[in-house]
Amino acid sequence: MISWTQFLENIVTTRKDVDYSQIQTVYNKAHIAIDLIKMYEPQIMANIAIVANLASGAYGVYNSSEDNTQGDTIHVNVRRIMNEKKTDIEAVLEIACTIIHETTHEYEYGNHGKSDETGPKQAEAAFMAWVQQNWESIMEHFPELNEPSPYFQQKAPKTAHPYTNTVQVQQP
Ligand SMILES: [Zn+2]
């Protein structure tokens, strides 16, 4: 894992390089998804210039016809994710996974001229494994993930992993 100093430098660099203003306008914690990806693997978004909002349909879209010399564009359906998730943590991780998924399509298409679902799904799984391994550090460094959110009623317990977060109520 990279040092936190390096991580903060990566974030500063990324925020200059990648335009994610559309998704940030829709959801004020979307930037955490970008930060997590840079913390995970700074080079993963090297070819991406814009993370645009997607108004309807799938979780995400990459269309090679939008590629240009400034960098490529991927789209994330932030509202759909917010509608389907129950907490900031779940929403931010799904946005990050969607970005990684579409970025993998972009990378495969750019380097091999074709792409299917195998690589993007593996890339998402690898990211989520890393999230699980670094869960406490992530929660410590992104306290916004546990602050009350105007978008979600529920608040996930601080140490619970979102995808295994089933609260069992013991009956007497
Ligand atoms: Zn896909």
Image (tube, helix red, strand yellow):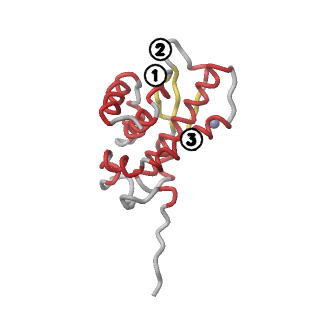
- Identity of the amino acid at label 1? Ala
Q: Is residue 109 above or below residue 26?
A: above
| Residue holding disc 2 | 70
Residue 70 makes an appearance in the image: yes
- Identity of the amino acid at label 3? Glu
Front-most of residues 128 and 56: 128
| Residue holding disc 3 | 124
Q: Is residue 61 above or below residue 163?
A: above
Q: Nearer the viewer, mark 3 or mark 2?
A: 3
- Identity of the amino acid at label 2? Gln
Question: Is 18 on the left-hand or right-hand side of 73?
Answer: left
Q: Marks 1 and 3: CB-CB under 8 Å?
A: no
Q: Marks 1 and 2: CB-CB under 8 Å?
A: yes
Q: In what element is the residue under mark 3?
A: helix
Q: Which circle marks residue 49 in the picture? A: 1
Q: Position of residue 112 (x, y in %)?
A: 68, 20
* Residue lying at 36% horizontally and 47% vertically, measured from the top left: 137
Q: Earlier in the sequence, mark 1 or mark 3?
A: 1
Q: In what element is the residue under mark 1?
A: strand
Establish whether ligand 1 lies closer than 8 Å to the Cβ of label 1: no
* Residue lying at 45% horizontally and 87% vertically, measured from the top left: 172
Q: Earlier in the sequence, mark 1 or mark 2?
A: 1
Q: Nearer the viewer, mark 1 or mark 3?
A: 3
* Residue lying at 68% horizontally and 37% vertically, measured from the top left: 118
Residue 153 makes an appearance in the image: no
Q: Position of residue 138 (x, y in %)?
A: 37, 46
Q: Categorize mark 2 by other alpha carbons within 10 Å: few (<14), some (14-19), many (20+).
A: few
Establish whether ligand 1 lies closer than 8 Å to the Cβ of label 2: no
Question: Is 44 on the left-hand or right-hand side of 122?
Answer: left
Q: Quadrant of residue 117?
A: top right
